[in-house]
Amino acid sequence: MSGVDDEASQAVPKPAPAAAPAPPDPVEVAQRNARFAKVAGPGQLHAAVLALLLTPGRAREMSVWRDECRHTVGAKELRNELMKVEWPERMPWLEWFIARVALGPLDKRQQLLRAVRRLIAADGRTLAIDRLRWLAIRHALGDVRALARPAAAEVELEGLATGTALQIGRFGAFLSRIVPAPEIDLDVVSGAATSGERWWREVMQPWPDAGATRDMPDANALVSALHDVQALPWMMRPVLVRRWVDAAVALSPAAQLAAPAAEALRIAARLLDSPLPPAVASCFVEVEAA
């Protein structure tokens, strides 16, 4: 017994749990936000948007950023500071900077769009969230705007034409690769219904006879589907967005949206010029820069 006792006494103690990170200093955050709010020149706005799209560890993306911003004074310092921004603030700040670019000349907007395409394609693969961000930036810069149909108070989602329901299904099929959780190859190979598939079936329940499938749309089909969904009467678009969000929340652990789903649904709401449902809005820290 003494041998066992000796071994026990010599056992390596378990390390103490890591301390939670200290909350950000409100004064430092306010000062940082004030610095970001002063970013106004075309070159710095260009650098800021691309910096917020960078994926840590992807060298080819960083090479594109360096090439795009090589003539911008202070770009590296701005990039380093923006890459420290926590996820809940990244999308609001991205929207902030893009909105400023949208106020500028057409050539600067087009230049940014070309740069974003270079960046997201830098490593030879474009994820679904990358394509969605691209659509959001193009929309925010005013590159394409759908013409909404007149509002029809008597028409509900269930009463939409089959063609429109099919387009909702196509855009939803794309979203389902991210919502309620990013889909990976292992999910598909296993043969079991993924959470994305379950989400898509739920949101498509109003149109059981539309003949929609969850096939991933190609780039042209995705843009066409989005254009038709954007053309829904303005009162119906928030109803559709809430349906997407409610189904995602129901399928999320502890009814809490994961970061990729929250971002995708935020972008979807922006694309449809729809208010953010509370379950999405609560995931983000909005910009309060002076």
Image (tube, rainbow, N blue to C red):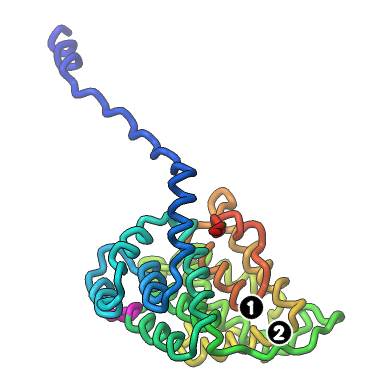
- How packed mark 1 is, by other alpha carbons closer than 10 Å (few <14, some 14-19, many 20 or more), is many
How far from the left and from the top, in percent, is residue 223? 53, 88
What residue is at 56 percent from the left and 83 percent from the top?
170
Q: CA distance from mark 2 to mark 1?
A: 9 Å
- The residue that disc 1 covers is 272
**Magenta span contains residue 59:** no
Circle nearer the viewer, 2 or 1: 1
How far from the left and from the top, in percent, is residue 76? 28, 66
How far from the left and from the top, in percent, is residue 233? 75, 83
Tag count: 2
Magenta residues, start to end: 119-125
Quarter residue 212 falls in: bottom right
Quarter residue 117 falls in: bottom left
What residue is at 53 percent from the left and 78 percent from the top?
173
Tell me if 247 is positioned left or right of 176 in this view.
right
Name the one closer to the observer, 44 or 174.
Answer: 44
Tell me if 256 is positioned left or right of 60 in this view.
right
**Magenta span contains residue 124:** yes
Name the one closer to the observer, 180 or 17.
Answer: 17
Three-letter residue code for mark 1: Leu
- How packed mark 2 is, by other alpha carbons closer than 10 Å (few <14, some 14-19, many 20 or more), is many
Asked whether disc 2 touches disc 1, contact meaning CB atoms under 8 Å apart, the reply is yes
- The residue that disc 2 covers is 232
Q: Quadrant of the N terminus?
A: top left
Three-letter residue code for mark 2: Leu
The numbered mark, 2 or 1, whose residue comes first in the sequence reads 2
Q: Is residue 129 above or below residue 5?
A: below
Asked whether residue 195 appears in the rendered view, the answer is no
Considering every residue shown, the one lying at the far right of the view is 154
Q: Secondary structure at mark 1?
A: loop
What residue is at 60 percent from the left and 60 percent from the top?
280
